[in-house]
Every structure is written in structure tokens, then in C-alpha cells.
Image (spheres, rainbow, N blue to C red):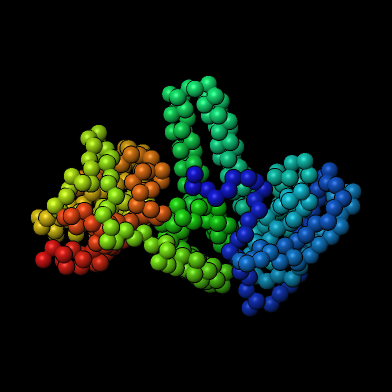
């Protein structure tokens, strides 16, 4: 599953900063909460390393109360923190808002005065629908296992994979299209940072053009870059080792092994039709293949797709005229596990003896390395 957590309301640590450059003014959050027990409610600002308390109040039996703080025109995220670890999350840039809800159905709150907060509320509702479907299917699958209905379990596994993919794609689309920066950053924080690293890398490159004046965006990018800086421990390096065997099926159903290419230089190329960075890199791979294919070099494409027709369509569209294999299990691919793949595109250059001599060669680096070894 590609999502970091599934339970709502959300309890998150969000990489959000606020700017101190604008003149501050008071904003007020007015709440009408039917059936709410008397309790202490906190207004919190959600920050990168900590959640800061801005205001608090002890409510009465009527459930009507106000919280306030000094804000500025820089967008940020705030949350109302209730008892029982319940929350309402708001996306504000200094405007006052009114919230109406019922303690017995807190997730169905309405918010007035903040289009960004309304958008975030609708996003929560949509994600919750996906999660409810996933949880329901999980219960059904548990029942199937008890009954030993293997054929139905296989179909249900496909449905579960499709649901997870749909949820991931919905979150990515929201992050890519939201006109509210805090909302976009909140959405990407739900994604698994290891599995969805290609998307997050691509997303990060769009922030300066989408929100050119936002200090929030600059601060988030700085934090993201620090968190993704490569180390010797997390590089996908098998350099110097014999490449793990791969034995998977072509689109036509034939089984192909990596070892069958022994005697040639082979670029083991991990990619997928749904991976935007992979598709952008494919022209470079095609150019290298056409330049060196007659010099004892070939490519073995290993797809992390789970949809055969989309996989085949991408092969044709991108003119990938080499051998392709996959088990159509997405991130659950055996080959991805054996090669410690946590993000794609990823590749490994294997020499004629089956030893990995380089990895993650992109753009001109791939051509330069091939020129070096294929002299």
C-alpha cells in the first residue's frame, strides 16, 4: 500500500512554515458544536518540527466558543484539537472563519469564510471514501481466507491493488492541482515518501513556478531537499556484486532470465508506465540503445506496472525496442525487492560476466559510461 496511514481524522506532522515578514492581525475562529461535552479546546499551528499552541478555551455545555490568534497573509495550516484526540484542520491566510458541526459526527463539519479550508475539508471526505472501501474489502478478504476461497481472494487482491492505486492517484492529482499551497503540502505528506519518491521529486520542482512568492514553499523545499539527500546507506548500490537473477514474463507470456544475456553488457532498467520521471527519461535510454545496440549491449526493461495494457501501450508509445519483462505486481515485484528498489527510474549496468559495474545512470551519464566500457 502506498499510503502512510489510513485512520481519520488525521493526526500528522506537517512540514509547514509561516513567514514573519507581513504585518500581523487578529483572526478569529468561531465554532458551533452541537452535543459537545465540556472540555478544553486548543488552537494549534502545525509546524515542521513541532505543533505550537496559539490559544485555548474551556467550553461550556452549549458548544459555542471562539479561538483567536495573530496571523499574517502567508498561508499556513492550523488545527482545532479536541478531547479524544479529535481534530479539525484549517488552511488559513489570516482570515476569520465560522465552523458548524456535531460532536457525534465531527467529520461532517462545515467551514465558512475560507475557500482553502473548504477545499481541504472536501479532500478529507474524498480520501475517507476510498479508505472506507479499502477497509470493507479487507473484511471481505479475511472472510474469504477463512473459507479457503483462493480464486476469489486472487480477484479481491486485484481489486485491492486497484483501490490503492486510485487513492494514490487522487492524492497526487489534488497535490498537483490545488491552488492552495498548504493543502498541496498536506496532501503529499500522506504519501509514502519511499514508494512515491519519483512523484515527490517531480512535485517539488513545480513549487517555485506554482507559488513563486510563497516563503512557505521555499521553506518546504529546503526541508524536503535535506530529507532526501543521498547517503551511502540508502543508495541502491550493488556495484561490484553479481547481479541478482531476474526471471519474469514478457508481455507475450514468455519467461526471460537476466542470465540469458550473459556475455553482453546489459542495462537492467526499472520503470513503469505510470511513472512520469521514467517516461521523461525514456528518450535518453532510447538514444543510448540505438547508439550501442550493435556493440554487445542491450537493455532489459523491468516494469513495476500492474496493468498489462498500459504497460504495453507505454512500450509502443516510447519506442522501447528491447526486451521487457514484469510480474505485474507493482511495488510488490520480486525483482524490485531483490534489487532494493525504493524509487524509479532506477537502472543497473551489468557486465558480460554478470557483475554490476554502475547504477542509476541517467541522461549523458549513461552514454558516457557506455562509451567508456564499449570502446
Q: Quadrant of the C terminus?
A: bottom left
Q: Which residue is drawn at 21% across and 66% down?
A: 369
Task: Decide: is 203 above or below 319.
Answer: below
Q: Residue at x 50, y 66 (%)?
A: 227
Task: Decide: is 70 above or below 8.
Answer: below
Left or right of 229: which side holds 83?
Answer: right
Q: Position of residue 319 (x, y in %)?
A: 21, 49
Residue furthest to the right: 61
Left or right of 258: which side holds 56?
Answer: right
Q: Where is residue 345 in the image (x, y as percent from the top left)?
A: 34, 55
Q: Residue at x 47, y 68 (%)?
A: 225
Q: Where is residue 272 in the image (x, y as percent from the top left)?
A: 34, 48
Q: Where is residue 238 in the image (x, y as percent from the top left)?
A: 32, 58
Q: Could you say which is closer to the camera, residue 167 or residue 357?
A: 357
Q: Which residue is drawn at 84% across and 60% down?
A: 57
Do we see residue 189 in this rendering? yes
Left or right of 71: which side holds 351?
Answer: left
Amino acid at each position: 500500500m502506498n499510503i502512510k496511514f489510513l485512520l481519520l481524522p488525521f493526526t500528522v506532522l506537517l512540514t509547514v512554515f509561516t513567514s514573519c515578514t507581513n504585518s500581523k492581525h487578529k483572526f478569529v475562529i468561531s465554532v458551533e458544536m452541537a452535543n459537545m461535552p465540556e472540555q478544553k479546546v486548543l488552537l494549534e499551528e502545525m509546524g515542521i518540527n513541532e505543533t505550537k499552541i496559539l490559544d485555548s478555551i474551556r467550553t461550556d455545555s452549549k458548544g459555542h466558543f471562539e479561538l483567536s490568534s495573530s496571523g499574517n497573509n502567508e498561508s499556513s495550516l492550523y488545527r482545532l484539537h479536541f478531547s479524544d484526540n479529535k481534530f479539525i484542520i484549517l488552511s488559513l491566510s489570516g482570515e476569520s472563519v465560522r465552523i458548524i458541526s456535531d460532536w457525534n459526527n465531527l467529520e461532517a463539519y462545515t467551514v465558512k469564510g475560507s475557500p482553502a479550508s473548504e477545499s481541504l475539508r472536501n479532500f478529507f471526505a474524498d480520501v475517507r471514501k476510498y479508505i472506507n472501501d479499502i477497509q470493507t474489502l479487507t473484511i471481505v478478504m479475511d472472510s474469504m481466507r477463512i473459507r479457503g476461497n483462493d480464486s476469489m481472494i486472487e480477484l479481491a487482491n486485484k481489486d485491492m491493488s486497484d483501490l490503492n492505486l486510485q487513492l494514490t492517484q487522487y492524492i497526487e492529482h489534488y497535490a498537483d492541482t490545488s491552488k492552495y499551497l498548504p493543502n498541496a503540502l498536506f496532501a503529499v505528506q500522506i504519501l509514502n515518501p519511499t514508494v512515491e519518491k519519483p512523484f515527490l521529486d517531480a512535485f517539488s520542482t513545480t513549487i517555485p513556478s506554482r507559488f513563486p512568492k510563497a516563503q512557505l514553499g521555499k521553506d518546504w523545499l529546503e526541508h524536503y531537499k535535506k530529507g532526501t539527500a543521498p547517503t551511502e546507506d540508502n543508495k541502491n548500490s550493488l556495484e561490484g556484486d553479481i547481479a541478482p537473477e531476474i526471471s519474469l514474463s514478457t508481455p507475450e507470456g514468455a519467461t526471460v532470465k537476466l542470465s540469458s544475456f550473459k556475455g553482453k553488457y546489459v542495462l537492467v532498467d526499472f520503470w513503469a508506465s505510470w511513472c512520469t520521471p521514467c517516461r521523461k527519461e525514456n528518450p535518453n535510454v532510447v538514444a543510448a540503445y540505438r547508439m550501442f545496440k550493435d556493440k554487445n549491449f542491450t537493455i532489459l526493461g523491468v516494469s513495476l506496472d500492474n496493468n498489462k495494457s498500459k504497460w504495453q501501450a507505454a512500450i509502443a508509445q516510447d519506442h522501447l525496442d528491447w526486451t521487457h519483462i514484469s510480474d505485474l505486481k507493482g511495488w510488490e515485484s520480486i525483482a524490485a525487492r531483490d534489487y532494493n528498489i525504493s524509487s524509479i527510474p532506477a537502472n543497473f549496468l551489468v557486465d558480460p560476466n554478470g557483475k554490476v559495474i554502475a547504477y542509476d545512470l541517467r541522461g549523458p551519464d549513461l552514454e558516457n559510461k557506455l562509451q567508456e566500457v564499449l570502446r
